[in-house]
């Protein structure tokens, strides 16, 4: 009884008690799956289980390296994710600077409410919306036809258009929401700077160029650095819901390829091998970007 | 700020206003268009003349949804899923955030745990080890696979404990002096002050759970366990509306087309987000900016 009493008086014990549910969930859904990674080096025989299946060394990796489809998929992933990275850096900064210049407060608030909205809608809903407006009989094609006399384009069935559409629709969905952090940074700039510049005769544009942009430069550099983490993720939800057989050539990315071949096609070892490499690269990217962010912007995760 | 009234400045204001109107139209157009399609006559909708107002207004598409039993079964699955996720994840997040909000000298394992969680959760074998693991746990075709993996959300925990770290230090010192233990602090001192951040994470949880569709694609085979977004994904996204043989489920073609029926289902699925979003908006800017600022 005495030992139990001492345990209850110890604050550390209570902290651990509070963390108990998290430990259980974390073990079940994050730690347990780790041992499944050995599949990348085994030949899976379902009746023998993961542990009982024979080792095959680097066989799956040799196969992947020799498979031209894999290089294709990697190229698609990088093209789409880099496109998104660049646009999602430029457009939200521009929008935030413009919003910051608005003098009528209710207009600013309304535009914020409107542009944040798509962030909260799922890609399932938006895929339904975009498939409709981008179809051959859709409203975009009707406008193009009436105004320019152009022939109907099947946007989502075209290898030329698919990647640009992924990048543009992503900007459409996320541009407003991504301004939050820049707007917060802009409000923290000392207003005296603007007043002083105005007295010196600086124009609106000069104030924007010499005060606003340098004022958020650190935040820009920080977000640019951290966004590198996502370079191997081109956006599964968006692509999975919008692509189809016609655009596998340009639209198939690592995650969709792993899902289609690895899980649906039951090539478990191949899918795990890709997932494992992806994780390794992802982990190193996180380590690198967080170190850089800490060094240069004094950013800490916690 | 002193308001200057030069010509250049006014022209700039005019340009800004025009730009903002344009941005708003571009953002709203696809959404408004879909709603307009759902209220339009199928023939008008199919010929591309509907833009932002319905043509030949009709409610047939919505009557079509009413006849669709699976829509309501899936809606109920989503409601149950949200209730379970919300209740459990709020408790787990709130309890877990407390030890992590302590200084390292008060909770010695703090940094070790945080780094372990961060590293392990950013390193995993991807979808296949997770799938085999969940199958081993007996969670295939089980309602709880839709809930359990979502209960531990590191981002939400981070948000709550950073919120606490921005509260005045004296609060903690005073309660220590009065001899309050961790549980007393948690429920009598922090709880009443934490309502804004709890509202933020609750609304995030509701929106995320409502929008989640992928888990059921991988783990659920029984139709009575399919959530609404997954159901929508299967009928709206996977079915190609240009193929005639796939048109006409849930009504005759003359009255309600696949296109207007889909638009009605999309609109109905969007509705809760459109309702909850204004509430969310009020909290999240405050919540995010506070939660991301470190001392």
Image (cartoon, coloured by chain):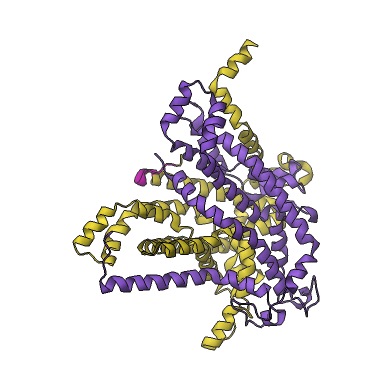
Chain colours: A yellow, B purple
Residue pushed farthest bottom?
A149
- Magenta stretch holds residue B275: no
- Magenta stretch holds residue A295: yes
Image x and y of residue A65, in percent: 58, 57
The segment highlighted magenta reads: A294-300
Residue pushed farthest left?
A200
Q: Which residue appears at 73% of the width and 72% of the height? A: B61
Image x and y of residue A269, in percent: 67, 50
Q: Is residue B161 visible?
A: yes
Q: Is residue A182 left or right of residue B81?
A: left
- How many labels were placed on the picture? 0
Image vertical order of residue B100 relative to residue B4, above or below: above
Q: Which residue appears at 52% of the width and 39% of the height? A: B194
Image x and y of residue B131, in percent: 69, 48
Q: Nearer the viewer, residue B132 or B239?
A: B239
Q: Nearer the viewer, residue A243 or A191?
A: A191
Image vertical order of residue B289 relative to residue A70, above or below: above
Image vertical order of residue A55 relative to residue B102, above or below: below
Q: Is residue A77 visible?
A: no
Q: Is residue A61 left or right of residue B166?
A: right
Residue pushed farthest top?
A2
Image x and y of residue A6, in percent: 58, 14
Quarter placement of the N terminus of chain A: top right
Q: Nearer the viewer, residue B27 or B249?
A: B27
Quarter residue A149 falls in: bottom right
Quarter residue B103 falls in: top left
Quarter residue B55 falls in: bottom right
Q: Is residue A223 left or right of residue A55?
A: left
């Amino acid at each position: 009884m005495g030992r139990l009493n001492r345990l209850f008086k110890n604050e550390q014990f209570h902290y651990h008690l509070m963390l108990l549910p998290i430990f259980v969930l974390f073990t079940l859904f994050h730690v347990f799956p780790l041992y499944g990674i050995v599949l990348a080096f085994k030949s899976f025989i379902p009746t023998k289980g993961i542990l009982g299946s024979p080792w095959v060394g680097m066989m799956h990796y040799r196969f992947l390296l020799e498979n031209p489809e894999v290089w294709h998929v990697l190229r698609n992933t990088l093209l789409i994710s880099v496109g998104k990275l660049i646009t999602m850096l430029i457009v939200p900064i521009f929008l935030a600077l413009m919003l910051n210049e608005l003098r009528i407060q209710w207009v600013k608030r309304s535009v914020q409410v409107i542009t944040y909205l798509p962030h909260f809608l799922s890609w399932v809903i938006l895929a339904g919306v975009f498939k409709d407006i981008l179809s051959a009989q859709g409203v975009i094609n009707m406008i193009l036809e009436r105004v320019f006399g152009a022939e109907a384009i099947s946007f989502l069935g075209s290898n030329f258009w698919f990647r640009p559409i992924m990048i543009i629709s992503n900007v459409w969905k996320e541009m407003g929401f991504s301004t939050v952090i820049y707007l917060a940074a802009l409000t923290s700039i000392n207003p005296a700077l603007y007043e002083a510049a105005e007295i010196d005769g600086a124009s609106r544009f000069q104030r924007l160029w010499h005060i606003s942009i340098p004022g958020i430069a650190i935040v820009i550099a920080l977000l640019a650095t951290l966004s590198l983490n996502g370079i191997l993720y081109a956006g599964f939800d968006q692509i999975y819901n919008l692509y189809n057989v016609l655009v596998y050539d340009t639209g198939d990315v690592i995650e969709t390829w792993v899902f289609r071949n690895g899980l649906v096609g039951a090539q478990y070892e191949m899918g795990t091998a890709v997932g494992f490499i992806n994780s390794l690269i992802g982990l190193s990217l996180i380590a690198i970007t967080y170190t850089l962010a800490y060094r240069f912007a004094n950013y800490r995760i916690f | 700020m002193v308001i200057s009234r030069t010509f250049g400045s006014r022209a700039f204001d005019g340009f800004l206003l025009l730009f903002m109107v344009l941005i708003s139209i571009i953002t709203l157009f696809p959404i408004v268009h879909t709603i307009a399609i759902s209220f339009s006559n199928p023939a008008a909708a199919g010929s591309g003349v509907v833009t932002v107002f319905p043509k030949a207004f009709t409610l047939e598409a919505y009557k079509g949804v009413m006849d669709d039993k699976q829509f309501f079964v899936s809606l109920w699955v989503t409601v149950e899923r949200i209730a379970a996720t919300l209740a459990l994840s709020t408790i787990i997040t709130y309890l877990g955030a407390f030890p992590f909000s302590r200084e390292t000298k008060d909770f010695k394992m703090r940094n070790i745990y945080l780094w372990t969680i961060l590293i392990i959760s950013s390193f995993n074998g991807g979808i296949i080890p997770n799938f085999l693991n969940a199958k081993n746990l007996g969670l295939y075709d089980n309602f709880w696979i839709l809930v359990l993996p979502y209960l531990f959300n590191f981002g939400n925990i981070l948000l709550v404990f950073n919120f606490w770290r921005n509260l005045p230090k004296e609060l903690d010192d005073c309660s220590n002096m009065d001899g309050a233990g961790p549980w007393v602090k948690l429920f009598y001192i922090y709880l009443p002050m934490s309502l804004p951040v709890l509202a933020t994470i609750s609304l995030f949880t509701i929106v995320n759970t409502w929008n989640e569709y992928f888990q059921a694609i991988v783990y659920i085979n029984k139709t009575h366990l399919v959530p609404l977004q997954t159901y929508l994904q299967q009928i709206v996204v996977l079915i190609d509306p240009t193929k005639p043989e796939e048109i006409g489920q849930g009504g005759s073609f003359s009255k309600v087309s696949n296109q207007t029926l889909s638009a009605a289902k999309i609109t109905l699925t969007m509705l809760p987000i459109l309702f909850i979003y204004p509430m969310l908006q009020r909290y999240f800017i405050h919540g995010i900016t506070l939660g991301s600022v470190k001392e």
